[in-house]
Image (spheres, rainbow, N blue to C red):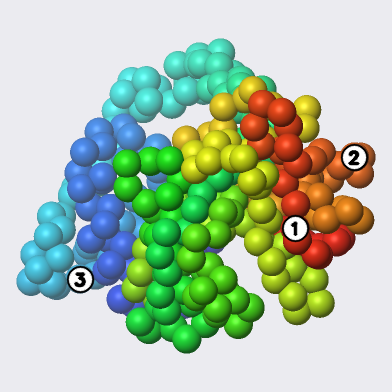
Amino acid sequence: MKDKTYLVGEEMTVADLVMINKVSGYMKGLSKEERWSKNNFSRWYDLIQNSTDQEILSGLGVEKIKLAQPTQKSASTANPKASGEPKEKKKKEEKPKKEKAAKEAAVTVITPAMIDIRVGIIVSAEKHPDADSLYVEQIDVGEEQPRTVVSGLVKYMTLDELIGRKVLVVCNLKPASMRGVKSFAMVLCTSKDDKVEFVEPHLTSVPGDRAYFEEFSGIAPEPLLNPKKKIWETIQPGLFTNGSGEAGWYDADKKFHKLCVGSDGFVCKSKSITDGIMK
């Protein structure tokens, strides 16, 4: 407010009335010294309260506040320069730097081990009642109840091709509502040239078996991926099938970490799509 009389333009507007309504409680709670130290803000507040009819102020829940200059002693106490408080100010300036350093130290390195990929079997499937391109599947992933999963596979697979299939399921994505049906996981597929196939585990695997990437085995995945950390969004662009149709993840150095399942390390594969994108 240093170079302004009103919040907007050259005369009082609704913006000033809305703001005085929001800050009146704050101003009321300040001491005389604190109000005086906020000279530009207090000047604006005093102008608005004295330019507005009392009836309007009452309707806004605003009480008039008398703004008076405090005694020299009080002002000196409220003024950091007069009270010799530069050291305290320095401490306040140092605190954000320490907090920033702590946050930087706490930055988590994102790896594919954070993704919870499990073997599942599609026990039933049907067309989405309100979306022609979506299926609603019930998938057994080794839990007490099958998970409801919504997939955009109508264009690529029939219901008969879905039911009874052994698939890989991403289980720790945040549940998402898709046209009114909440999906609690995602089926992992690979695609290329408008062709889509499931990424399949080994025939010996059973629902609930966890898949893992080479060199990232034995690490517990996140219980639920935090959308703010963009973990899935960071890993997914590196998910592919290689020239042999094997599923895996390319790291920043272009090293391919195969996606495996079981203690014998069976590699998960696509039936026929090579060098395809996985998602």
Which residue sits at x=62%, y=25%? 219
Give the mark toward the camera: 3 or 2: 2
Could you say whether the residue bearing mark 1 is in a helix, strand or loop? strand
In this rendering, would 179 be left or right of 206?
A: left
Give residue 235's position: percent from left, percent from top: 71, 47
Q: Is residue 90 above or below residue 216?
A: above
Which residue sits at x=64%, y=23%? 218
The mark that comes first in sequence, 3 or 1, is 3
In the rendered image, which quarter contains the C terminus?
A: bottom right
Give the mark toward the camera: 3 or 1: 1
Q: How many marks?
A: 3
Q: Three-letter amino acid code at disc 1?
A: Ser
Residue placed most toward the observer, 72 or 58: 58
Q: Which label number is shown at residue 255?
A: 2
In this rendering, would 26 be left or right of 163?
A: left
Q: Is residue 181 above or below residue 244?
A: below
Residue placed most toward the observer, 133 or 36: 133
Q: Which label number is shown at residue 126?
A: none
Does residue 96 appear in the picture of this structure?
no
Q: Which label number is shown at residue 52?
A: 3
Which residue sits at x=41%, y=46%? 39
Could you say whether the residue bearing mark 2 is in a helix, strand or loop? loop
Residue at image mark 1: 270
Residue count near mark 1 (Cα–Cα under 10 Å), binned few <14, some 14–19, many ≥20: many
